Image (cartoon, rainbow, N blue to C red):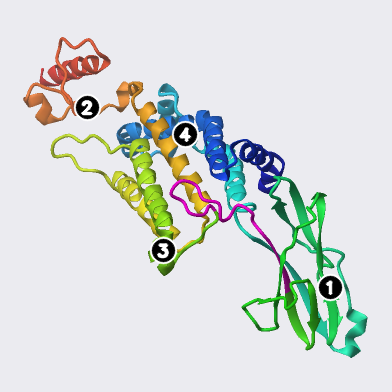
Amino acid sequence: MNFDIAYQIILPAMQKIAEVTHSYGWAIIILTIAFRLLVSPLVAQTTISMRRMTKLQPQMKRIQERYKENPELLQKKLMEFYGKNKINPVGGCLPTLIQLPLLFALYWTFNGPPFTDKTIDVKVNVVKAEDTKALTKAEVSSTNTIYISKKNVAAKVVVFPGNSDVVAGSDLTFATRAVEGQLPPDFNPQWRLVMPGGHQPLDSADGTGHFVFPTVGEYHVQAVIPGIAKNDSFGFISGLGKVATGANLLKPANFDIIFLVLLFGGTMFLSQKLTVPAPKLKPGQELDEQQLIQQQTMKTMPLATTAMFFFFPIPAGVYLYLVLSNVIQTLQTWLISRMPEAEVIEDPDDVPALTNGDEQNGGAANNNGRHGDDNDDSPKGAITRKEKKKSKRRKN
């Protein structure tokens, strides 16, 4: 599904943009902005739902504590609470699931041709002469990849023949062809061979797909399909297809990737901080266990993800996409945070009643810890007057 979306929709769009702007860097930026605008209603719905759920946590916890001995009534009370406040506990999940195919398709596009080389692998099983009855040969390779030419023409490439069985001492000549689109006359993949028990591929001696298989064992013939834009620079990025991990990041030539990784972590942290703001505590009040876990996760997840990227091979063009996506989402979340939020609506029966200490002090604490008086016309004030009347009747 992601491959089809990328090949049929995103790649042609990227080719057109690159053709107009003469830059695959601008193609990444324009496609990213277009994607974020497309999913912005879904992202907004998710963000609003998460912020609303965070605000309602104290009231939900109070309902859970009050009816924990009666699961059926607890479920009913929670559903009533959700309905009154117009929230759906899974409302933030569905928009995220809807946009995931597009997200992965865009990632696949920026992580493939024309930004990186892609390898098509063909297995060759070499057997003894007496085993010739078991010889088979597939017409084409079981996998394929995309090649984009310098003229922005896309083709889906396979290797032929495919997985094969041959007798020791035999030779085969492999080649490529397009099953969709058209390859240019100057198309020339790099050919490599992995020997039995070997791990490092050996380049073809004559640069062609002709190989000899002298001994019994499992060989792998590889056709490396080049990415034409992997060395294209954009701004401070020296190569959109450049990949560096671990100690290689310390080389001055790779400082641009370090900067992108750190920028990704910083924007991710800021976006999460705006999406799930820290609870407003009263003097002497502490975070409960759930709130502590939520705040710790918000702090550690950007750090863990950023640290992972130092060891995960990702092209610089993908980092450009991730950073720009985070910046746009952070801006959208900030705008949402400036919008007025609806007040919390509670069932009066679920608001804490007066304690003896409150009665003696002449006040009543409501569910938010604030005190009402007899002249309060709000629902909270009404609850206070009701409790005071009950208190007087008990004293009489």
Near mark 1 (Cα within 10 A), the count class, few <14, some 14-19 or many ≥20, is few
Q: Nearer the viewer, residue 165 or 65?
A: 165
Q: Nearer the viewer, residue 352 or 49?
A: 49
Q: Which residue is mark 2?
A: 353
CA gap between label 2 and label 3 equals 61 Å
> Which portion, as a residue range, is magenta?
221-240
Q: Is residue 232 magenta?
A: yes
Q: Is residue 329 left or right of residue 36?
A: left
Q: Nearer the viewer, residue 202 or 10?
A: 202
| Amino acid type shown at disc 3 | Leu
Residue 31 location, x and y as percent? 57, 37
Q: Which residue is mark 1?
A: 173
Near mark 4 (Cα within 10 A), the count class, few <14, some 14-19 or many ≥20, is many
Q: Is residue 174 above or below residue 6?
A: below
Q: Is residue 80 left or right of residue 300?
A: right
The disc placed on residue 374 is: none
Residue at 43% across, 33% down: 47
Q: Nearer the viewer, mark 4 or mark 2?
A: 4
Q: Nearer the viewer, mark 3 or mark 4?
A: 3
Q: Which residue is mark 3?
A: 249
